[in-house]
């Protein structure tokens, strides 16, 4: 690989993925689950069993938690440490793109594909997100790249690397780390008319290596937690996710078409123009194009067929797509340079002027700063709103109850083989509010009326958190006025003894 190209890729990655990461707060609902789980594992000195709110938690496998635990050990429990490994794996993903694009074609195409991937909106966003997807992307890509390079060169020993990477993918995201790359390989070999080659892939030594890697975590977890682990991890977080939509509004046929169009920005418009202009003039596909096409389309179609849809799921399709389309921009190098240079200017601006205010509004860091000086051993902390804020627990280190009416609690209380099983946070109904403790309540602005109607006693407002600057700016631009809206209010009731419920 060309040293100058590698230096350019590294500089682009440092600017796009690491810059400002220490400023972004931990957001709800997803990032706070991962960070709080790792924080509790660290406190318990348990590097095997994920746990949250004091209970074991079987949402995801162990790989990403190990990354967070290592980072917290080195850098402390903070925002930079939380976002360090996603940025590292995003950088690795870009280098893998350069490497594979160069191996398939030439260095210029590899460089173009790598920079295109790094400067695409979805990839840039996920490089900062405290979630598993960047780790999965790398393991998923190594699985498929090592297979193809071994297949093309007639070197079956490459398949050991493929199975090892697939094992790491299963430790990152679950069975999908083996099943989906396997499906891609199967479809590709069928297109090649070479299904007999499967015998060379699924050799005992390859399967044993895969099993040994997977067993590092799955075996002791099954031994220790038994049926509870299998039911929750495989049942709820894998089978249920594929068959019952967690968010029915996103379960539409065009979901990933829309996500791809947005996620590939700013490359979307020239690529659409290219596709329309050259639709009838595409040359016959060789083995390389076949593999890239099968890789990208299988990922997108597979997750489109699944009931639960997240914008992150099709990330592994971006890498082969960028290599496939890089040839178009190599022939239009001035366009490529212009878009790339513009992205390196625009993304830092987006980071500081858009991403930071938006993430602040999706985090309870400001609420935590207000209530921390008020807390002591005799304080009960509750939160009332649409969603429970794990980031509030992350930043305060306190046990915080989700406050609900009795009727609503019956609807959302944890039940087996249901999405409500994810509601593992501590609950409290309004009738259970303690009379002999000081109570601090963090109330979402939209739920203030409901809170005051159901919470007995005299409450006083001790703090308010406003929506971010973006809402105010939008009001000023579009309506000629500036309106500041509240995000949440913080109420307090009582002191050492509180007995009056009138």
Image: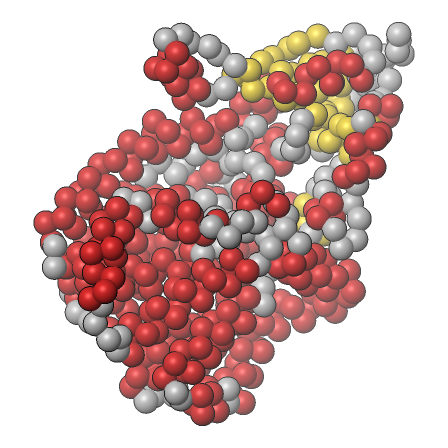
Q: Position of residue 70 (x, y in %)?
A: 50, 53
- The one of 165 and 77 positioned closer to us in this rendering: 165
Q: How many marks?
A: 0
Residue most extreme to the front: 280
499 lies above or below 258: above
Q: Is there any visible trace of residue 311 in the rendered image?
A: yes
266 lies above or below 370: below
Q: Is residue 132 left or right of residue 381?
A: left
Picture quarter containing residue 402? top right
Q: Quadrant of the N terminus?
A: bottom left
278 lies above or below 446: below
What residue appears at the point 15 percent right and 63 percent down from the top-left corner?
108
Q: Is residue 227 left or right of residue 384?
A: right
What residue appears at the point 34 percent right and 27 percent down from the top-left corner?
353
Q: Position of residue 452 (x, y in %)?
A: 75, 13
- The one of 458 and 436 positioned closer to us in this rendering: 458
Q: Is residue 122 left or right of residue 380?
A: left
What residue appears at the point 54 percent right and 49 percent down from the top-left corner?
252
Q: Position of residue 334 (x, y in %)?
A: 10, 49
Display coloring: secondary structure
Q: Quadrant of the C terminus?
A: top right
Q: Is residue 169 left or right of residue 338?
A: right
Q: Is there any visible trace of residue 496 in the rendered image?
A: no
What residue appears at the point 27 percent right and 64 percent down from the top-left corner?
324
Q: Position of residue 437 (x, y in %)?
A: 81, 19
- The one of 14 and 415 positioned closer to us in this rendering: 415
Residue most extreme to the left: 334
472 lies above or below 285: above
């Amino acid at each position: 690989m060309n040293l100058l190209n590698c230096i350019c890729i590294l500089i682009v990655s440092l600017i796009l993925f690491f810059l400002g990461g220490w400023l972004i707060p931990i957001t709800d609902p997803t990032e706070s689950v991962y960070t709080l789980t790792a924080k509790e594992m660290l406190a318990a000195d348990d590097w095997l069993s994920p746990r949250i709110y004091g209970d074991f938690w079987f949402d995801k496998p162990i790989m990403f938690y190990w990354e967070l635990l290592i980072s917290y050990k080195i850098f402390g429990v903070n925002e930079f440490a939380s976002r360090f490994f996603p940025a590292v794996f995003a950088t690795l993903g870009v280098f893998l793109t350069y490497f594979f694009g160069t191996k398939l074609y030439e260095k210029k195409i590899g460089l173009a594909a790598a920079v295109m991937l790094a400067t695409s909106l979805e990839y840039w966003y996920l490089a900062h997100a405290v979630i598993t997807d960047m780790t999965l992307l790398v393991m998923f890509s190594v699985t498929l790249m090592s297979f193809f390079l071994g297949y093309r060169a007639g070197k079956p020993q490459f398949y050991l690397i493929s199975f090892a990477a697939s094992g790491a993918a299963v430790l990152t995201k679950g069975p999908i780390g083996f099943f989906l790359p396997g499906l891609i390989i199967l479809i590709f070999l069928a297109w090649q008319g070479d299904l007999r080659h499967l015998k060379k892939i699924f050799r005992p030594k390859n399967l044993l290596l895969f099993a040994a890697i997977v067993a590092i975590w799955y075996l002791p977890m099954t031994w220790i937690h038994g049926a509870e682990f299998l039911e929750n991890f495989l049942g709820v977080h894998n089978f249920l996710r594929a068959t019952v939509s967690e968010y029915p509004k996103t379960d539409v046929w065009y979901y990933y078409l829309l996500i791809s169009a947005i996620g590939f920005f700013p490359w979307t418009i020239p690529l659409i123009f290219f596709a329309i202009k050259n639709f009838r003039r595409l040359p016959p596909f060789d083995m390389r194009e076949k593999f890239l096409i099968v890789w990208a389309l299988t990922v997108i179609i597979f997750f489109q067929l699944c009931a639960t849809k997240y914008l992150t799921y099709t990330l592994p399709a971006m890498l082969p797509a960028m290599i496939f389309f890089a040839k178009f921009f190599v022939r239009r190098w001035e366009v490529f340079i212009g878009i790339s240079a513009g992205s390196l200017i625009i993304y830092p601006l987006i980071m500081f002027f858009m991403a930071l205010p938006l993430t602040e509004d999706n985090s309870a860091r400001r609420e935590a700063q207000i209530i921390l000086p008020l807390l002591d051993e005799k304080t009960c902390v509750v939160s009332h709103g649409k969603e429970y804020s794990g980031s509030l627990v992350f930043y305060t280190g306190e046990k915080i109850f989700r406050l609900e009416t009795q009727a609503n609690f019956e609807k959302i209380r944890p039940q087996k083989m249901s999405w409500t099983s994810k509601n593992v946070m501590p609950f409290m109904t309004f009738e259970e509010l303690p009379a002999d403790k000081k109570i601090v309540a963090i109330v979402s602005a939209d739920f203030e009326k409901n809170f005051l109607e159901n919470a007995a006693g005299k409450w006083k407002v001790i703090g308010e958190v406003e929506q971010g600057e973006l809402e105010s700016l939008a009001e000023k631009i579009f309506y000629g006025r500036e309106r500041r809206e509240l995000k949440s209010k913080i109420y307090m009731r009582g002191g050492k003894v509180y007995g009056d419920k009138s």
